[in-house]
Image: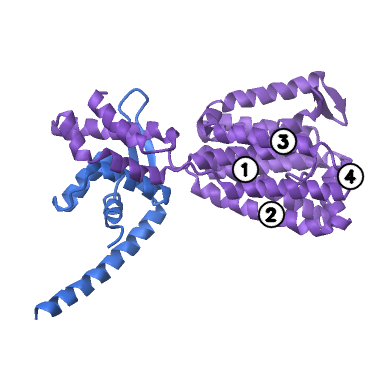
Chain colours: A blue, B purple
Amino acid sequence: MKGCTETLVLTALKHKQMYGYEIIKELDALSKGVFELREGTLYPILHALEAEGLVSSKWVGAEGTRQRKYYVITRTGRTVLKDKTSEWSMFKVAMDQVLKGATT
Amino acid sequence: MKSEIKEFIAQVTREVRFKEAHAEIAHELNGHVQDLMENEGLDSSRALARLGDPSEIGAKLNKVHRDDWNWSLIAMTVSWFAIGVIAMSLVGRTNAQFLYGFIGLSLATWLAWLRPLSLRRSSLWIYLGAVAFVVYGFLFGARQEGLAYLWLGPFRVNVLGFMFVPMLLALAGLVERLRSSSALLILALMPVTALVAVHSFYMSLVFALCVLAMMIVGRVSVWCWGVFALLALGMWIAGFSATDFIFGPMVESEAHTDFVIGLLRSRAWILAPLVLGIGAVMTVQLSVMTFRLRSPFGRCVSVGAAVYFAVGLLYGVLAGLGLVGMPVGGVVVPFVSYGGSMMIGAFALVGVVVGSWRRKSFN
């Protein structure tokens, strides 16, 4: 299914704003280690989501100290996530039916 | 930064052609490596291995961070200007428009190259410079019908008109820097007061509307822009009801600013829908861009330009059709009316919007 990682990232950001490293940890925890992402590839995904207006970002921390770029899901992002979630449920039901049919 | 990490990040950014995006990418990736090393006790090479292939990351980032000159906006600006020149020459009112157009385009190109960040950072200086220029003009310039004029080389400029766009740009930066504060309120009200004081009916209206739109889009609090709107309106009513404006025309309108009227009544009337059409499309495009831009400064300039163009067109048309009985003097149809300052100013606004659009993928 297209846009799988994007959907996972949006899900991770659903409840709070996070910076890149935190998102990796969250994805790891949510999927219980099943989805292992090359951590660097998270950033092109985040930047593309931001360009599409699904997340927005801001730098937090004073200059000179450790600064982190926090990402937060936007309203458009929530709508897209909702669509993706229902799309996935439909896909899952259909897939289950096909697989069940194949075994019986 | 360790040389190994530096080399990795350099391999990533090498793939990203738009160099201005490099700094932010480097900063973010370095932060991630530091987090891996601190939280998980990894050494730098293991941390880097977790990130993956640098050139693959870079290639993907390159697709997002494109140097995106907004050619449709540029093309529309140039054609709006070109049609304006043709229309004005058909009604026999040409001036040094080509010269102004050339200066305006050069200025816009320079502003599109310039990082909006540096413009935003110097917003207070631009503001103070504009105030100083206006004060100097009113003290030492030639006075005529309440306005002040200065000679800048071969050009005779109306000091308030000349500072109109720089002041708007400065306020766009100040909206982001000062947020909702009484300082912003005072700085925004000063130019409106000055324009009302010289009885510049149209300019004070447009300026106040532009600043109001910038405050709303720049997420200034409701009380702040509400108070601004109320005070500007109050000042406006007080300023203009005190004069004989309700009883008769106040400012003698200059020939070129009656452009739409002149155009509609001449053989060039066929060009009027073209001018209005391009203007309308451009206003819509600028409004859409406002919401797709992320930097508050870029958003403010973009919405300011949209309001400036929309009010100019709308007022020009309504006055031309005799639907508004307000004084027409000083109404500026952007890119068409041949007043040099406003023409160059309109180009400058577009230049800053294009510059912000190019860098919309990073902060």
Please tell me how crowded label 2 is: few (under 14), some (14-19), or many (20+) other residues with Cα within 10 Å. Answer: some
Q: Quadrant of residue B127?
A: top right
On screen, residue B225 versus residue B328, left or right, reads left
Residue B230 to residue B193: above or below: below
Label 2 sits on what residue type? Ile
Q: Residue at x 37, y 54 (%)?
A: A77
Label 1 sits on what residue type? Gly
Q: CA distance from mark 2 to mark 1?
A: 18 Å
Percent position (x, y) of residue A42? 28, 45
Q: Nearer the viewer, mark 3 or mark 1?
A: 3
- Indicate which disc residue B102 carries: 3
Residue beneath disc 2: B278
Disc 2 chain ID: B
Disc 4 chain ID: B
Sequence-wise, the earlier of marks 4 and 1 is 4
Percent position (x, y) of residue B41? 13, 31
Q: Residue at x 40, y 54 (%)?
A: A75
On screen, residue A42 versus residue B345, left or right, reads left
- Indicate which disc residue B249 carries: 4
Secondary structure of residue under mark 2: helix
On screen, residue A30 versus residue B31, left or right, reads left
